[in-house]
Image (cartoon, rainbow, N blue to C red):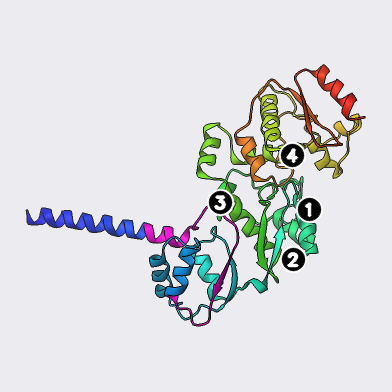
Amino acid sequence: MFFRNLKFIFILFVIFFAIVFLSYHSAIDKSAGEQGQDISFVVAEGDGVKKISQNLLEAGLIKSKFYFEIYVWRTDQEADFKAGSYILNPMLSAKQVIEILTQGKTADREKTIKIIEGWNVRDVAVYFQDQGMGQSDDFLEMVGYPKIDYRYNKNLPTPRDYVNDFDFLKDKPDYYGLEGYLFPDTYRVFQDALAEDAVLKMLANFDKKLTQEMRQDIISQDKTIYEIVTMASIVEKEVRSVDDMKVVAGIFWDRIKNGQPLQSCATLAYILEENKGQYTVEDTEIDSPYNAYQNRGLTPGPICNPGLQAIEAAIYPEFTDYNYFLSRPDTGETVFSVTYDEHVANKARYLR
């Protein structure tokens, strides 16, 4: 009886410490929130760990005051916090918050960068160069050039591999770059930050925005994240509004199901690196695996870096009776049609 009770107590201790261990790592390694706005946070001269942790908890920047303090004391950083004004975000983990506050990464040492929905990697490269974050070619060597299949371009340096850091990249073919995954958003980086620092932020942001529910829904549809991002990138470049994105995604998924080419002008713009109001017959015949007029199914990879709304549209499309659409060049409005004759009439009316 004694040994049975002892075994029961031992099991309870194991369960208790397992719960504490998991709670500790959840509070320290995971962000306080899945998304949120930047928050101005001040560490005043003389503020101790208890005061700082209390202020962080009240600001919604950490999950647990208790575990925050335990981690600080366990890592012997209680005397390392530096006074100053900081820009923090609930998406940061407690470890990241501690790193910022103990290294004195104050707001005056940071700048804001903004990646726009629909930019491709070349657009991002030029932007980073303009921001003084390195040469555009160095950036493209790191993340991969657009349209390049590295199986057949051995003369180019292989893009950096982040698959061990981010699970969502596991179904991406390793012979393509990061086109599609540089999540468009506004970011805070240090004044002397290099492009790689921003890339890590963008990939981490993608990881947070693509929720577990979304990932499970992708699996239940027998699709891959790579396919969803590729579809989202095409939808992103085709239409503007959320509702239109869902309808267009439905049209495109139906075309794939029916064995039809997507016939997306956005893919021609990606190949030619030129936006036109209307593409010629010669344009639609250009020899490229990214030509969605000549090839059925999805393009080999994404044609831009889509935002969350386009990604959601690719996962949760709206299936309608529409089979065709065009964007009015004067207003940007999407004009849908059921039959090809209606579509031809709309082209004559709006694309003159």
Name the residue beneath numbered marker 1.
123
Dot 2 falls on a residue whose secondary structure is loop
Residue 133: numbered disc: 2
Q: Nearer the viewer, residue 129 or 312?
A: 312
Distance (Cα) linking label 3 and label 1: 23 Å
Mark positioned earlier in the residue sequence (3 or 1):
1
Residue 240: numbered disc: 4
Distance (Cα) linking label 3 and label 2: 24 Å
What crowding class fits label 1: few (fewer than 14 Cα within 10 Å), some (14-19), or many (20 or more)?
some
What crowding class fits label 3: few (fewer than 14 Cα within 10 Å), some (14-19), or many (20 or more)?
some
Distance (Cα) linking label 2 and label 1: 14 Å
**In x, y percent, where is residue 195?**
70, 62
Q: Amino acid under label 3? A: Lys
Q: Is residue 325 magenta?
A: no
Mark positioned earlier in the residue sequence (2 or 4):
2
Distance (Cα) linking label 4 and label 3: 23 Å
Mark positioned earlier in the residue sequence (2 or 1):
1
